[in-house]
Amino acid sequence: MLQELVSENWHSLIRTTSIIVAAFLIFYGLIYPLLFHPLAKIPGPTICALTGYWILYKSWSEQRNHYVDDLHKRYGSIVRVGPNEVDISDSDYLKEVYVQDMDKSNFYAQFINYGSHNTFSTIDKAGHIESRKASAKFYSKSHVCSEDVQVKIRGVISKVLKVLEEQKYKPINVFILWADMAMDAITLFSFGSKYYISSMDDPFGAGRKIVLEFFVQSSSWFWTTQLPRFYDWVVPQAVDDATQRCCDWIENQFNRSLDGVGESEQSLVNTLLGGKVHSNGKKPVFDKQRAKSECFDHIAAGHATTATTLSYIYFELARHPEVQQRLIDELSQSNGGKHLSVHNLESQDYSRIEELPFMNAVIDETLRVYAAIPGQEPRLAPNTGMVWKGSKETPKCLIPGGTIITMQPWSVHRDPTVFTDPNNWNPDRWMSDNQEQLKAMHKNLIPFSAGTRMCIGMNLAICEIKLNVSSVFSRYTVRLEEGFDYDSKAFFSDMYTSFPRFGQMPIVFDSIETKQELMS
């Protein structure tokens, strides 16, 4: 009898405990996130409120940018994309989130090289300010536009023109060529003219090889930044091998460049390591290991993003010959009414072409539609939270401290209240006389992010792009390769950092001189 009573009480306890556990799980796993969580007022799919793995799946499957943009179309300018994450597509919040410098999330802390952090991966504000200060003047527009730097960039562009003359009338994979060009510019900038290894000296041999190594190395971005605890389980050895070869390639140049520290030629290495101990006894931010990590970060990011932007400039101009002709005419006019000879390998003078309105319109429109970094730029709401001021779809509410806040350029660049027919590539939108409209569009154009943590290499990238476009279209017209399936082989990938998905963008270059001779 006693044994039966004990058994019954035991089963009763198990049932009660099971009910309590089930109720707890239902409340905190289902009811609380949907109804009582501080973000419950923010609209979005139910699955996003319940688990963070859904948005991670969208990132892994290369759908996130489009998916979040579709959510904005359904739910408005703020959407809940995770249990503790929101995305905002309203540029009025750019200042609060980026310019006023909210803390970075741990997303960035994974971007370390050689076991050392760099400016990009530094999360704390004070550390970031000190780190960025070391190279800010070196990347300033005044330095990039200085004659010493301009001579170097023009030299790289001259190598590009030589390749185009040798390869004209044949399809050229410009993603590789532009990556070689940008790689030359940033390694020359980083290590100095005596110590860098030129990719443009053998663009489709050794240059192509190292570009593809970086291409493979970057393929692990999701596991590196989103789920690093699974990295060793899922990333193939081939990716680690490519990463090691990239590290070795940069380290070789870095070690050589150490001989130039203290020399008169300015380089990134010289800038980071040439400083002395501060008067207060504080050591410089950069030692050799951190400086090497900084160089890797600048080189890896700087060559791929510039190559992507240029690839889609040429792709769109090849698809729109009437737009291409307007650009050619503008450049001809700036060149005194003539086209430049393909046998003249001199680059354009940057000061003369920098403000050409239609060329800038073409570049701005490409940066809008094909931002090389179109994905999330996560920040953390401060401890006091951030006030959502309210919109048609979402009432005013407080976003609690610690919430991840993202504003992906992909969506900000496609705000239909600012950009008519936002998915259409149309440079003429930037030729408007409506100053208010232009102001709104420029406010919504953030391909280099915004605030104190925006891309430090922006001035160098813009200079490369403008010198490339002006120098090439003063000599050549471009067209697509017949029979190549651009939709399936050169589409714009959906990732944090994007590029032509398979690293292909074949373009055919025709000499303007030859066309004129045939016409005459």
Image (spheres, rainbow, N blue to C red):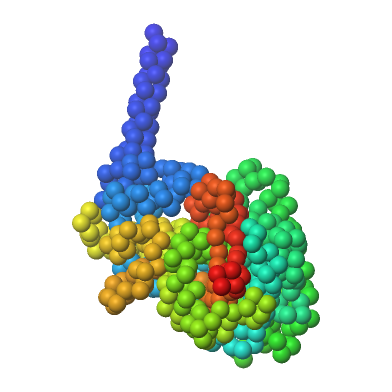
User: How far across and down, in percent of the image, does residue 458 sit?
Assistant: 52, 74
In terms of depth relative to the viewer, which is nearer, 486 or 305?
A: 486
Q: Quadrant of the N terminus?
A: top left
Residue 122's quadrant in the figure? bottom right
The extreme front residue here reads: 520
In terms of depth relative to the viewer, which is nearer, 370 or 333?
A: 333
Q: Vertical placement of 102 versus 209: above or below? A: below
Left or right, residue 335 beside residue 204: left
User: How far across and down, in percent of the image, does residue 155 sit?
Assistant: 67, 79
Q: Can residue 300 be spotted in the picture? A: no
Q: Can residue 346 be spotted in the picture? A: yes
* Residue at point 36%, 20% (across, down): 12
* Residue at point 41%, 50% (across, down): 66
User: How far across and down, in percent of the image, does residue 382 sit?
Assistant: 38, 65
* Residue at point 28%, 50% (across, down): 75
The extreme top residue here reads: 1
In terms of depth relative to the viewer, which is nearer, 163 or 390?
A: 163
* Residue at point 53%, 64% (across, down): 314
